[in-house]
Amino acid sequence: MAAEFSGISKARFEAFSDGVFAIAITLLVLELRVHGNLPVDKLRDELIAQLPRLGAYILTFLSLGVFWVAHHLMLGAASRVDRLLLWLNNFFLMFVTLLPFSAGVLGSYTHSRDAVAIYGLNMTLIEIFLIWIWVHIVRHLKREDVSPLLVRSGFRRTFAGLGIYVFGALLGLSGLPLVGIALFWAAPVSYILLQTFVDHRPHARARIRP
């Protein structure tokens, strides 16, 4: 139907998304800065003071990498792009570009329950729209040769990430911000380990074809 046609090629859609991810990841590093004209004997203290921001940077960089990989695999399973997918993706990218702000707040106020809640809420909204994108692709745009195992794996991992971020945000609000942050680390680390040690086994490669 004409109403379902986006008028945008899948290649252009992916290029735009990749560009937004690249900008968001680049903006993260702007939170890392050392004040100029410091005495030499104060440099070490300044670097130590930057460690929370460095931790927030690494955590968010890895998380954005995971979101990019998941987004790439999901779009690989789509046969085309429609208007609803365009707008779901726009909202998904809106919260992706908000992450440099959330990471900056988290790095500056690591022990604040509000900072952890803001970061967890940002991640939660990203996961929600990622799940929505996957649901729409599976129901309406999925290529015929996509493995059912890939579909199940996509749902399993995105819902696991959603649960981690919601629980982490709630832990922050309940007065356990450092526990919430530790939980946030579990999402990208577990995904990367699964990608490295599970999906690269011979039988997994044979069944999962993005």
Image (tube, rainbow, N blue to C red):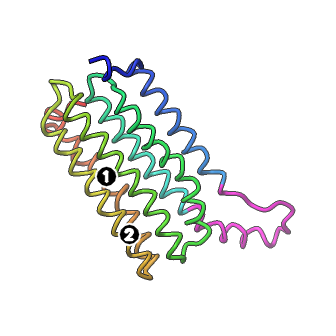
Q: Is residue 196 left or right of residue 182?
A: left
Q: Percent position (x, y) of residue 141? A: 24, 28
- Quarter of the picture containing the C terminus is top left
Q: How many numbered marks have been drawn onto this rendered protein structure? A: 2
First in sequence: mark 1 or mark 2? Answer: 2
Give the left or right position of residue 83, taking residue 202 as reference. right
Residue type at tag 2: Gly
Over which residues does the magenta segment extend? 31-54
> Which residue, given by chain and number where applicable, does mark 1 sit on?
191
Q: Position of residue 185 (x, y in %)?
A: 40, 63
* Quarter holding residue 169: bottom left
> Within the image, what quadrant is residue 25 found in?
top right
Q: Main secondary structure of the magenta part?
A: helix
Q: Where 18 falls versus 190 (above or below)? A: above
Q: Hey, what amino acid is under mark 1?
A: Tyr
Q: Viewed as shown, does residue 56 lie left or right of 84?
A: right
Mark-to-mark CA distance, 1 and 2: 17 Å
Question: x%, y% of residue 204?
Answer: 16, 39
Between 194 and 44, the one nearer to me in the picture: 194
| Residue in front for this viewpoint, 199 or 5 | 5
- Let me know if residue 52 is in the magenta part: yes
Quadrant of the drawing holding the N terminus: top left
Q: Is 50 inside the magenta-drawn segment?
A: yes
Label ID, residue 168: 2
Q: Is residue 132 above or below residue 144?
A: below
